[in-house]
Structure formats: C-alpha cells, structure tokens
Amino acid sequence: MNVRLQTAIGALVAVVILTACGSASNQQPDPSDLDPSSTTNATPVNESTEAEELSDSKQDDESTDHQAADKPDASVEDGYPTKPRAESVPREPLQLTDEGSASADFVAFRNTLRQAVQDRDSTFIRAIAAPDIRLTFGLPITIEELDLDNPNAPFWKHMEKALATGCASEIFGIEPERETWVCPHVFLAPGEVSAIDPYEDIVIVGENINVRIAPTADSPVIDTVSNEVVRHDYDSINDLTETQQQAMSTIEGWHPIITSSGQRGFVSSQYAYSPIGHRAFFTKEGDAWQMNVFIAGD
C-alpha cells in the first residue's frame, strides 16, 4: 500500500470534538436521506433491515431533490426560520475509496467488529485492544475507562460511525513494519485535497445526500450534496439542543453545513465526517488484529 504524506498530521490543529455522552437525537434520519446507490456512501448499521424501505423511497427522493433544485428559496416556506446565505466558494469534490475492501483478511475482521459494535460486545473490544492502546491526547487512560459495559457509552456510537464508511491503508509510524488500517478513511482526506481545513471543513461521504432546512427528517429539502467537501456551520450549532449537539458525532444526528453555493442547512450526520473526528487504527499481531488507537482531535 502507498504511504500517505506524514505532513497530513502536521496540518491538523487542536479542535474541540463533541464526544460527551448523550442520547441520540429523537429524530432519526429517514430513508430519504439515505441513498443505497452510492459506491462510497456510509453503511448503515441496520442496512440489511432497511434495504427494502430505501429502495421504495428512491423515486420519491429523486423528485424531492428536483423540486428543491428548481426552488432554491423553499427554505422560506412552512414557517421555518431562515439565515442569510454564506459566501459561495468553488465546489470541492472528493471521491474517497474504501481500500479495506481489497483485503479479504481485513474485511472479515471489520465485519466481525461491526457486528460486535452493534451487539455492544465489550468482551470482543477488550480482546482486540492493544495493551498500550492510545485513547487520548492527554494523560493515558485504560480501555476500562471507556465504560464498555454500558451499551449507551459514547464509545459505542463513536466507533459505530468510524466503521460505517470506508477505511484506508497506512504505514503511519504506529507499527511501521506492519500493515496498518485507519477507519474512517476521511482522516487521510487532507492528504488527498490540500485545501481541506481539518477544523473548518466537513467531508460528505455519499451520493445525493439531502440538505434540509432544519435538523429533522420531515423538514424541507433545500439542496443535495455528493462526495464533496463542505463547510461546518458553526453559527447554526447554537440552534441545536445539547442532545442534538452530542449526536452530531454519531450516525444518528444532524450536522449543520454550508454548501459551496453558500446554502445553510443540515445533513444526516451519518454522511458528515470531520477529518479529525474519531478514528481507529488496526494492525495485525500474529494471526489476530489489534486496535492500537481510538482517538479524536489532534
């Protein structure tokens, strides 16, 4: 596998990542915010049970998106408050590849890990955690301090999102003599697009992801975004409740963004990734995979 530029880390600046424990948003992304046709879209944890519903909603989704495109000022309707558009910027497409799918051994491990996370299998997580696993940038903490036996602990939701999309191979100085995988691949995005600002930008992973006027599944669709870099809308965070802010770093919330055209809105957080959000690093120890790092920030 090719070695990414070590300078990708040097570009990252300290950032506040919302990792506090909290309940997921009461509003779950509805099927109209999920597009199973994308080759790089995030993989819902319950994808197998939702596939039929997603397929049925696809035609309605397309017509909704066309209406939004034909009517860019739809945000003024239905009593929803509006905000002035931000400055427009050139669109920055970013088509990330799930390199992990090329390694049958890693794919098998990742599938098992995804199931363990869905099942809240704390025994499995303890088994794959390296003895010296890195979990913070500050004072070291142990795997036990993640409260793994609590199914509602933040770890589970953050790991769920980290594994929901693709992974990339990297010799990253953690175990330089061995193959290393990082999930999600978005962490290495600044090495792909030099213009990415790790603490100002958000990477959208997926095709035709709806941008809604409010952080609810029933609010009007005002735009769509596809595999591209958008801006984080810090101004709109204050409009979110504490619970909604906590859900932004999971697959169950809504993320405020600014599109390249300057449109402000919300996308399902399942498809919105910070380059310095939670990520996990895995290496092979003998015949078994280990998790060496699970961390957020820089």
Image: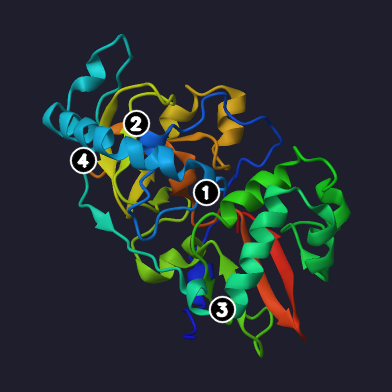
Helix, strand, or loop for circle 1?
helix
> Mark 2 or 3 closer to N-term?
3
Label 4 vs label 3: CA separation?
41 Å
Q: Which mark is residue 85?
A: none
Q: How far apart are the two marked residues, 2 and 3, measured between alpha carbons?
A: 39 Å
- What residue would you read off at disc 1? 48
Residue receiving disc 3? 104
SS under mark 4: loop
Q: Is residue 169 above or below residue 297?
A: below
Residue that numbered label 2 is attached to: 265
Residue farthest to the left, as pictured: 70
Dot 1 or dot 3, earlier in sequence: 1
Q: Secondary structure at mark 3?
A: helix
- Tell me residue 46's x, y (percent): 56, 45
Q: Quadrant of the C terminus?
A: bottom right
Image vertical order of residue 22 relative to residue 280, above or below: above
Q: Identify the amino acid type marked 1.
A: Ser
- The residue where tag 4 is placed is 261
Q: Mark 3, residues whose alpha carbon is within 10 Å: few (<14), some, or many (≥20)? A: few
67 left or right of 238 in image = left
* Labels 2, 3: front one: 3
Find residue 12 and report its horizontal and vertical position in percent.
Answer: 52, 61
Crowding around mark 2 (Cα neighbors within 10 Å: few <14, some 14 to 19, many 20+) is: many
The furthest residue to the top: 79
Per the model, the C-alpha gap separating discs 2 and 1 is 29 Å
